[in-house]
Image (cartoon, rainbow, N blue to C red):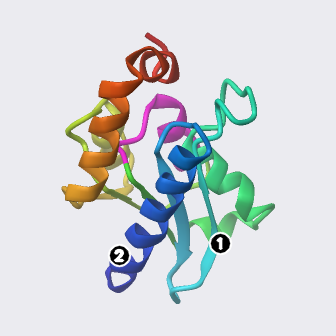
Amino acid sequence: MEKWDELGMKVAYEEAVKGLEEGGVPIGGCLIDEDGKILGSGHNMRFQKNSATLHGEISTLENCGRLKGSVYKRCTLYTTLSPCDMCTGAILLYGIARCVIGENVNFKGDGERYLAERGCKVRVMDDVKCKAIMKQFIEERPQDWFEDIGE
């Protein structure tokens, strides 16, 4: 599965850029199965859709449509930012095998630890582009960022 990490992060980052260009929070995601097939991708749509729950990971899962439970267990979820509690819960609910995170400098809750404790393999890429796009967003729109993380 690790051989798809570069592709998954590329797609997730492109989604984050789309989100920013649309006036939203620049967090993107992508779900890839063990054969390298992209099942879906998405980005945070809270501002675009006036939604309380459409974080990047949730948007990604939404865009995958309905999948059999067994499919998720053979997938990796890519996200540009360390997942919040809500997104961590979705990853665990569907039993997604791996979570690859672009960066955890601008935000890191308990999600990574909890995922690992529950058997999900976690990898943090420490991606420079992911860090830069989030840092810029937080500096330019701190009130929107704090709203997004419930502060």
* Circle 2 residues within 10 Å: few <14, some 14–19, many ≥20: many
Q: Which mark, by number, is residue 116?
A: none
Residue 10, placed above or below residue 139: below
Q: Which residue is mark 2?
A: 5
Please name the residue shown 62% across and 55% down the image.
Answer: 60
Residue that protrudes farthest toward the right in the picture = 66
Q: Which residue is mark 1?
A: 71
Select label 2 or label 1 by which is in front. Answer: 2
Marks 1 and 2: in contact by CB < 8 Å? no
Please name the residue shown 48% across and 53% down the image.
Answer: 16
Please name whichever residue, 20 or 70, is drawn nearer the observer in this view of the structure: 20
Distance between the alpha carbons at the discs numbered 2 and 1: 18 Å
Residue 114's image quarter? top left
Please name the residue shown 52% across and 89% down the image.
Answer: 35
Kindly state the secondary structure of the residue where label 2 is placed: helix
Residue stretch in magenta: 81-92
Residue type at the position of mark 1: Val
Q: As drawn, is 89 to the left or to the right of 9?
A: right
* Circle 1 residues within 10 Å: few <14, some 14–19, many ≥20: some
Residue 79, placed above or below residue 26: below
Instruction: Please state the horizontal and vertical placement of residue 49, each as a whole percent of the image.
Output: 75, 34
Q: As drawn, is 44 to the left or to the right of 78?
A: right
Kindly state the secondary structure of the residue where label 1 is placed: helix
Residue type at the position of mark 2: Asp
Residue 82, placed above or below residue 66: above
In reply to whether residue 27 is colored magenta, the answer given is: no
Q: Earlier in the sequence, mark 2 or mark 1?
A: 2
Instruction: Please state the horizontal and vertical placement of residue 85, each as a whole percent of the image.
Output: 46, 30
Instruction: Please state the horizontal and vertical placement of residue 41, each as a whole percent of the image.
Output: 61, 63
Q: As drawn, is 48 to the left or to the right of 96?
A: right
